[in-house]
Amino acid sequence: MDILVVRPLAIASASPVWVTMSIFWNIMIALGVIIAAVLGYFLLLRKQPSAPPDSQKTRELLQILGGRQNIQQVALEGTRLRVTLASLKACDYADLKRFGATGIFVAGKQIKFILKDATPELIKAIQEQLKEEDR
């Protein structure tokens, strides 16, 4: 009668140590390349500071929204510009679309829209224009 010897699978298929270490270092090199690529992407391709907004365009936007007397508050919500108006009837929606606004949303006395140039600098420029007109 023959005796059958059963070995655990781990012992039966054990690889030499140098093969295991080779795989380990290959994985480490691949991870290093991936991390370097991701960091390089974010460091080199991040958004550069935008140029200050044109004062003529700022004045034009204020006129489209009904002038200084119609604007109560201006804020930036992510990519949307939120403007609280005294009267929605004074705002020219067709001109606002021609100006480049998309996704115009009206709720109550607020109008929200997306401008591709909507930045915190634009908000500051609008607020400065509003202060200049108050003087």
Image (cartoon, helix red, strand yellow):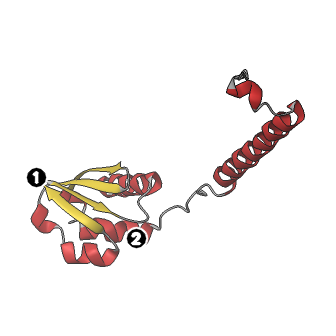
Q: Which residue is mark 1?
A: 108
Q: Which residue is mark 2?
A: 57
| Amino acid of disc 1 | Gly
Q: Secondary structure at mark 1?
A: loop
For this rendering, which residue is in front, 25 or 13? 13
Residue 60 picture location, percent across and down: 33, 71
Which tag, 2 or 1, sits closer to the chain's start? 2
Displayed quadrant of residue 26? top right
Q: Residue at x 82, y 39 (%)?
A: 25
Answer with left or right where residue 30 lies relative to residue 64.
right
Q: Is residue 93 above or below residue 70?
A: below
| Amino acid of disc 2 | Lys
Residue 55 picture location, percent across and down: 44, 66
Q: How many marks?
A: 2
Residue 98 picture location, percent across and down: 30, 79
Q: Check disc 2: other Cα within 10 Å, few if <14, some if 14-19, many if 20+.
A: few
Residue 17 picture location, percent across and down: 87, 30
